[in-house]
Amino acid sequence: MKTVDIVERIEGEARLNCTWENGFVKDTQIDFLNFRGFEYILEGKPALDALVYTPRICGICGQAHLKATVEALENIYKSLNEELVITNKAKILREIGLNIEIIDSHIKWFYMFILPDVIKLKENDLKEYSPLKGKRWLEACKTASETIKALAIIGGQWPHTSYMIPGGVVSDPTLLDLTSMMNYLDLAINFFEDSIAGVSFDKYLSFNSVDDLNILNEDLKYFTNLSFEYSLQKYGTSYDRHLALSDSSISKRGKIRQRLTDKLDLNKIKENCDRTFKVEEDSKNKEKHTWSKAVTYNSMFYETGPFSRAMVSHREFIYELHKSYKDSVFTRVMARVDEIAHLLHSTKELIKQVDISEESYIKPKISLKDIPKANAKSVVEACRGSLYHNVSIEKGIITKYDVITPTVWNLGPAIKDEKGVAQKAIIGSPSLDIAKIVLRSFDVCSVCTTH
């Protein structure tokens, strides 16, 4: 038997195809059917225009795309031994902006995307978690909205800010601005304590064992109880290989296959288009079923995202959960919510480090228009995982721009007989509802995937 279902509420939509045997998913295929074409749009544009275009690839992770673009352009200078001086203030403001965007995304994802589907395994009435009217749903929306205001203070707007440019940032927050940002983050911390974890913030940050699950209250306790009732600690396992291409204020770069290493070579990242539609090719090719490419590191599929970051960084609570529940839906969801707390703590510390007397921007001595030909790459840890940009320019004009998003890493199609990360995770699911929860556990973004 085969079923086909449209998965919505994923920043766009996807088509999930499942083949069943004895009541379990035997095989699966994930289709992203909306083509967008940002890589083509960027060709022939002035290099600095990418600072306006790439944040619009996604309405959720525009900061990550902006940071990836600006660092790719700065790496062009570095490749020519003309490395730009970026002040510590500019570096911190960029990191703060990225962190706030991730916090906002994780809160929305938990309350609008994954938790409602898990609750529906038990009952149809979402009650206080009902969209647009449920008390907790509305509180989560308000918290996310208040949090993102902290980013708008330094970015001028959200989404689609362009305040990062080669040489720094065009933002000079005052002490009052920094105080306001702290206040917004304190509201999010209060929500985490009162509604998400149900324990004090400091107590949660000290969690380091599976037994700490018993201390949880409120929504994480609710999620944990439902997960164990419906065996989400057993479903959703994949290759259990993890990759974080960049470091951040709370995580390290590296990969885990059989052991952890921080030695990464971006030249080992390869895209595969065997099952991917191409603009200029015949769409009747039956092997091709999606606009998503597949991507591997050193010829192997790797999962990326908050769970992988926690594993590579050996964050104790998630690392201990993994020992018991592997790379299951339960561990993956817990890792994303756990990252909210660590990002809130880290971001407040970063705000304290901002020296408002320091320069925000130092103009490059050489214009990109005066560079005959160059290429550079950059990597950033975004909401959903590792983001990769690769730009080539000639006399300031983009000749090629390649983007590999986190959802491509996690949701890309098979290569030959080897399943993509999410495909492998979905196989073995006992129902379509569970299969869709496994899919959602990767925090899917259709629009990023088909950029």
Image (cartoon, helix red, strand yellow):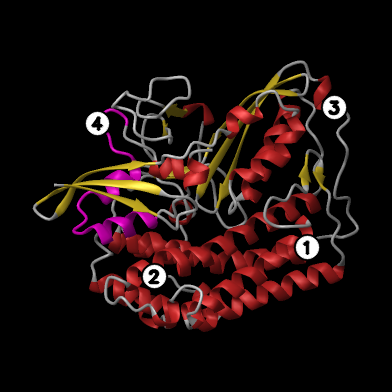
Q: Which residue is mark 1?
A: 153
Furthest-left residue in this view: 22
Residue 116 circle label? 2
Q: Is residue 7 visible?
A: yes
Of the residues shown, which amino acid type is indicated by label 2? Pro
**CA separation in Å, label 1 and label 3:** 29 Å
Pointer 1 or 3: first along the chain: 1
Pointer 3 or 4: first along the chain: 3
Do residues under tags 3 and 4 come within 8 Å of each other at their CB atoms? no
Structural crowding at the residue carrying mark 2, measured as other residues with C-alpha within 10 Å and reported as few (<14), some (14–19) or many (≥20): many
Do residues under tags 1 and 3 come within 8 Å of each other at their CB atoms? no
**CA separation in Å, label 2 and label 1:** 32 Å
- What secondary structure is found at the residue carrying circle 1? helix
Q: Which residue is mark 3?
A: 367
- Is residue 105 depicted above or below 142 in this figure? above
- What secondary structure is found at the residue carrying circle 4? loop
Label 2 vs label 1, nearer the camera = 2
Of the residues shown, which amino acid type is indicated by label 4? Asp
**Span shown in magenta:** 415-441
Q: Which residue is mark 4?
A: 417
Q: Is residue 327 visible?
A: no
- The x and y percentages for residue 411 are 39, 43
